Image (cartoon, rainbow, N blue to C red):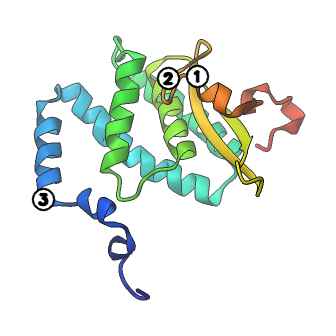
Amino acid sequence: MRGASPLARNSAIERVRFSPIVWRRRTARFLALPWRERRNLVSFVLGFHLVAGALRFWQYQKVVAALQRTTGILMRRAPRNPLPPDRIVDLVDMSSNAAMWRPNCLQRSVMVWWALLAAGWDSEIRFGARRRSDGSGFDFHAWVERSGEVINDDPSIGTVFIPLSTATELPPEARLM
């Protein structure tokens, strides 16, 4: 199917994401949200595009450092009573379904971490690796932890993937900023 649009190349399941019935249902759910959550949801959808583009062109450490610098601006504009962390994770998950592509685990984790940081909640992005069952290489995964608990993935993900050090655990001279 050379020359076909990316949507036409995707599977039937992917095409369902863009069907009118799905969009009507999503619109109804969106309108049922409180105004503040709607605003956050729209900003998270736009944030996914920013994060995905940044991760495509720059190193992870540079993207995280830039997001940390912009968070001060966002926190000054944030309401005094932020949404709870689990609700922020839910809204980021909803926004990932509204993106024009299916964000990968790193994009989702960076977005969750950034949204929590902007709301004033501490969290950290964790990375893990595991050997493929056929022995042909490694699989890698990213998730977000808050107070040692996984908040945007299966709680047992730390046992499936061997956790690696995070960017915040690296010594300053090893960081690429």
* Nearer the observer, 131 or 169: 131
Q: Position of residue 90 (x, y in %)?
A: 35, 29
Circles 1 and 2, Cβ within 8 Å, touching? The answer is yes
State whether residue 138 is above or below residue 128. Answer: below
Q: Amino acid at mark 1?
A: Glu
The image quadrant that residue 144 belongs to is: top right
In the rendered structure, which disc, 3 or 2, sits on the residue that comes first in sequence? 3
In the rendered structure, which disc, 3 or 1, sits on the residue that comes first in sequence? 3
Task: Please give the name of the residue rendered at 12% of the width and 31% of the height, measured from the top-left corner.
Answer: 32
- Badge 3, how many Cα within 10 Å: few under 14, some, many 20+? few
Q: Amino acid at mark 3?
A: Pro
Q: Return the mark for residue 145.
A: 1
Task: Please give the name of the residue rendered at 74% of the width and 32% of the height, measured from the top-left corner.
Answer: 162
- Badge 2, how many Cα within 10 Å: few under 14, some, many 20+? some
Mark 3 vs mark 2, CA separation in Å: 32 Å
The residue identified by callout 2 is 151
Relative side of 27 to 72, left or right: left
SS under mark 2: loop
- Badge 1, how many Cα within 10 Å: few under 14, some, many 20+? some
State whether residue 100 is above or below residue 142. Answer: below
Q: Residue furthest bottom?
A: 2
The image quadrant that residue 176 belongs to is: top right
Relative side of 55 to 173, left or right: left
Task: Please give the name of the residue rendered at 52% of the width and 57% of the height, measured from the top-left corner.
Answer: 53
Q: Position of residue 98 (x, y in %)?
A: 30, 49
The residue identified by callout 3 is 20
In the rendered structure, which disc, 1 or 2, sits on the residue that comes first in sequence? 1
Mark 1 vs mark 2, CA separation in Å: 6 Å
Q: Position of residue 142 (x, y in %)?
A: 61, 38
SS under mark 1: strand
